[in-house]
Amino acid sequence: MKRLLYILSIVFLFSGCEKEESYSAIPEIEYIDFSASYDNGPLGNNIVGTLTFSFIDGDGNIGFNENTNPETPTIYDVFIYEYVKVNGEFVLNDTTNYWMPYFEEGIYRTFLKGTIDIELTRIISSEDTARYEFYIQDRAYNISNTETTPIIIYSELVQQKATHFVFL
């Protein structure tokens, strides 16, 4: 009986341990949202779109140490392609590259996951309908999956946001 109790105690002890999640060393991203608003900046009226997506990297090697000085980033790791609708067809209009902050590997866990917001500024007079394709890469130059936004009509997004304001 004591032996059975001892074995059951060991089984319960190991079944209570939290298993660390494991993910692929190749980063994965997932589109979450796109919003837009007017920006009355020093260069005139622009529209600022905010692309939001999540990421997960199994070995946590996101961001390049070379980019820790924001004045002189050297290695891009977020790649965004803007397609605009011209004469009923989507054509590549612009390529924008960004860099993610450097995350040191293995401080808390071996994997790294989070959410990223990237602001994309555009001139009001540019095409109103667009979509974006984007991906990231990690320090081992593993490239994530490519995600695509739904079709974005900027004037509708800005108008929707404006109707949510309450003026007192």
Image (cartoon, rainbow, N blue to C red):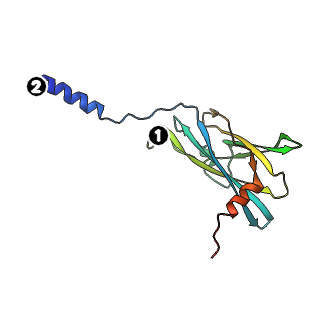
The residue sitting at the bottom extreme is: 168
Q: Tell me which amino acid carries mark 2.
A: Lys
Residue 55 image-quadrant placement: top right
Question: Residue 8: x, y in percent?
Answer: 20, 27
Q: What residue lies at 76% left-to-right and 54% top-to-bottom?
A: 154
Bin the neighbour count of mark 1 within 10 Å (Cα to Cα): few under 14, some 14-19, many 20 and up.
few
Q: Tell me which amino acid carries mark 1.
A: Gly
Q: Determine if residue 121 is in view.
A: no
Residue 55 circle label? none
Placement of 53 over or under 119, stated as above or below: above
Dot 1 or dot 2: first in sequence order is: 2
Placement of 84 over or under 27, stated as above or below: below
Q: Nearer the viewer, mark 1 or mark 2?
A: 2
Tell me the residue that label 2 is attached to. Answer: 2
User: Camera-side residue: 133 or 157?
Assistant: 157
Tell me the residue that label 1 is attached to. Answer: 106
Which quarter of the figure is the N terminus placed in? top left
Bin the neighbour count of mark 2 within 10 Å (Cα to Cα): few under 14, some 14-19, many 20 and up.
few
Q: What residue lies at 25% left-to-right and 32% top-to-bottom?
A: 13
Q: What residue lies at 64% left-to-right and 33% top-to-bottom?
A: 145
Q: What residue lies at 81% left-to-right and 58% top-to-bottom?
A: 124
Question: Residue 4: x, y in percent?
Answer: 15, 23
Question: Residue 50: x, y in percent?
Answer: 67, 53
Secondary structure under tag 1 reads loop
User: Camera-side residue: 62 or 2?
Assistant: 2
Secondary structure under tag 2 reads helix
